[in-house]
Amino acid sequence: MNDPPKAFHGAVEGVTTSLLDTLRVGVVMFDTDGYIMLWSPTVEEILGWPAEAMVGRYYGGYLTEDPVEASSGASVPRGGIYRAIGENGYWRGKLRVRHRDGHTVEVEARASLLTPPDCKPFVLANIVETSRLRAVEQDLAALDALFATSPLGIAVFDTEHRYVRANEALARLNGRPVHETLGRTVHEVLPQNMADTLAQIQSLVLRTGRPVVDTVLAAPDGHGWRSVSYGRLTSPDGRVLGVSSTVMDVTERRDAMEKIERARQRLKLLDDVGVALGDLLDVPRIARTLAGALVPRFADYSSVMLYGAVAHGGELPRAGRPPGAPLLQLGAAAKDRGPVVERMLRVGQDIALERGSIFESVLDSAAPHLVMSREELVSASYPGDPKVQAALDLDIHSLMVVPLRARGTVLGLLLLNRAEGRAAFDRDDLALAMELAGRAGISLDNARLYARERESALMLQRSLMPQQVPSPPGVQIAYRYVPGGSHAEAEAEAGGDWFDVIPLAGGRVAFVVGDVMGHGLRAAATMGQLRTAVRTLAALDLPPDELLRRVNDLADDLAQGPDEPLMATCVYAVYDPSTRQCTLAIAGHVPPLLLTGRGGGWDVTPVEAPSGAPLGVGGVEFEPVSLGVEDGSVLVLYTDGLIEHRGEDITEGLGRLMSLLAGLPAQPFLEDVCDRVLGDLDQGAGPDGRGAASSGPAGPARSTGPVGSVDDVALLLARLGGLPEGSSASWTFPAETYAARRARDAVRGVLRGWGLEALTDDTVLLVSELVTNALRHAHGPIGVRMVRGTSLLVEVSDPLPAPPRERNAAVDDEGGRGIQLVARGARRWGTRHGPIGKTVWFELSLP
């Protein structure tokens, strides 16, 4: 048979790729004798034999010897195919045909006997490769099974957005049967809002080809959630056929995720509140912080009410408290402000609780209470309660009353409210509130204990600080003491800083400023011991270096224990107004400053004295330094809390203090200088910025608040001047027998000039005894000095270093009564060592 015309081949080759191309259906036509008349190009692809080689040949020569399986399941010999076609006009079955390369190809064939009018009959057969047909069958079966058995909703849409295929799972999710879905768009099947979103997604996927995965939408009936995914369908040749869609019910997943997120938010809230309260040691601040941390994250309105004793560091309230005992509204927070909110919260006021109310019940039982409705809210307190009415006016519909507990005792109440527009509290919220209240209760109790200990330490410290500061002649004094704050608080905390002003013999005065390491009761107690030791040794009229050495020798006795050695710094200065000499020694302390007037301001000079090691370090020598000061100069003694700041070198703080003092006007009022120093250096503690202790001779040094530094601050200013003109007189007599007579004459003349004749006899007698004693033992020049101040001071000096001793002379002894007379006749007396000898002094009260 001749080859088919070229036009036929072109028509076949020009067909758009389709399922037939995927299956590769070949066409063979042969006559009734079995000779091939037509061999299509697809058959060429399947078997490899070209049409030129096959047309006109007998087909049976290319079948294998294997039996052929007919559609009926019976094996049919090769010659029997024609008989079957002749008898039935049709045959279907499987054949094994030799490929041109020699291997066997199994095909499925369908053959029909055709008899055109006026033409010879012929057989037309279609053949398909069995392997490809089975793959397509399996794919279709899998697709059918997927649609039939998948729990996911599956749909296929054409390019016009119409449903082409949908399964029963999708029908259940959409609430529409499959037959009411096919041929329709999503706008005809689903609610408007959901349909609009899905139509936009379909258009996007059709246009771009990018899939959209896991878009979560509300369910069509509004109950639950759906996850929708879309992908574009294309043919092998790239034609867009439509889109496919899968729909999954994710209500449980969404609910689980919401629960997880809720739990995460709860844990974060617990963590944030714990961090916010963790470093606080002030009850009012804890109450305010707790209330503020819960609004608006957890509630719309919150308040913290505590017993007054808890707020002020008192004892925990005992069981069986008096009925109607009020609570103090310490902390409150609100999502908005206004008169109604203020009427409900009443910040800073005492809240009286009605007996039998919900609030009273929670206080008594320590069990929380959850109000779930406005009706229950109305009955929460007495009829007409303005706080309840204010809550109703604010549309509050849910309330939690939670006890704040510590050590098994209720400290107060935590109230949380939610208004309209927000879901009511549930049991999970109540459990969270109880956890929050438990942590807050511990923080509040710790702050209460801290306040009590702090007050005890401050009380101890106030009792140990100078109760009266003297005003010695020629010296003006101003001072401040400000307790430091803990790192988390702006509350005063007792420390180990102290100052003192000690009158000495001869009109001299000692200035002391020291700093014991640490804070609290131990530091305050150690400070008191050190201050007592310094005052006791100062009465011995020791030089500054010798006094510090002896105090250092007491370090082991003053230490709390072998594991907590004493560590303190100190500066001890002695000023003599009559000579305008200042001698000082330093034990590891910050350097004092000396202000000297210049024009309209001050020259500020650090006192360059050898700074020995702090007290408590053994084997250290302290060296004194003496200064001659100008009249009106100011000596500034302070502790390191004044100049020490976090993250800053102490030298920077010292430079800032010196610059501040240099900028002050000359001859200022010392009280103003104290205030400027504490205020301008950001050290103020009180609302007025002064942060000062009371000063002056009328009262003790009382602290009023902390400074900006963590450490406390002691500040002592002394304006140094000389004695009034004509208030002192001095002489030096050689060690001759007439020295006593000349001394008596000089003393009489001075007393007469001062108008103190009433003291002449006593003074002359005592001076005569001391000068005579010096003549007998010292054998050197004898100095006599008289100073008139608040008392009459007389000093007798000689080169003998050994101090005189008071002894009881026998009746027949010719001497030994001089010091005895001085001890009995003077108001007080004493001895001090000088550079080249000793000085014996006594004081007499002025008439």
Image (tube, helix red, strand yellow):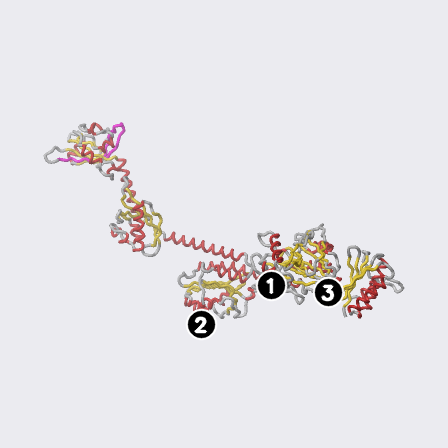
**How many numbered badges does the structure rendering display?**
3
- Distance of label 3 from label 1 (alpha carbons): 36 Å
- Occupied quadrant, residue 671: bottom right
Q: Mark 2 points at which residue?
A: 384
- Mark 2 or mark 1: whose residue is earlier in sequence: 2
Q: Mark 1 points at which residue?
A: 704
Q: Which residue lies furthest to the right in this view?
A: 812
3 and 1 marks in contact (CB < 8 Å):
no
Name the image quarter holding residue 223: bottom left
Q: Which residue does the image show at 26% across and 47% down from the upper left?
A: 159
Which residue is painted at 59% across and 62% down in the image? Answer: 690
**Left or right: 308, with 807 as reference point:** left
Q: Nearer the viewer, residue 171 or 712?
A: 712
* Distance in Å between CA atoms under marks 3 and 2: 76 Å
Q: Quarter-wise, where is residue 792 in the image? A: bottom right
Q: Callout 3, which amino acid?
A: Pro
Where does residue 475 sit, x and y in percent of width and height?
A: 70, 63
Kindly report which numbered mark, 3 or 1, lies closer to the viewer in this rendering.
3
Instruction: Specify which label sits upstream in the sequence, 3 or 1.
Output: 1
Badge 2 element: loop
Of badges 2 and 1, the one in the foreground is 1
Stretch of the chain drawn in magenta: 94-115
In the rendered structure, the answer to whether residue 80 lies left or right of residue 279 reads: left
Q: What element carries label 3?
A: loop
Label 2 CA crowd tier, 10 Å (few <14, some 14–19, many 20+) = few
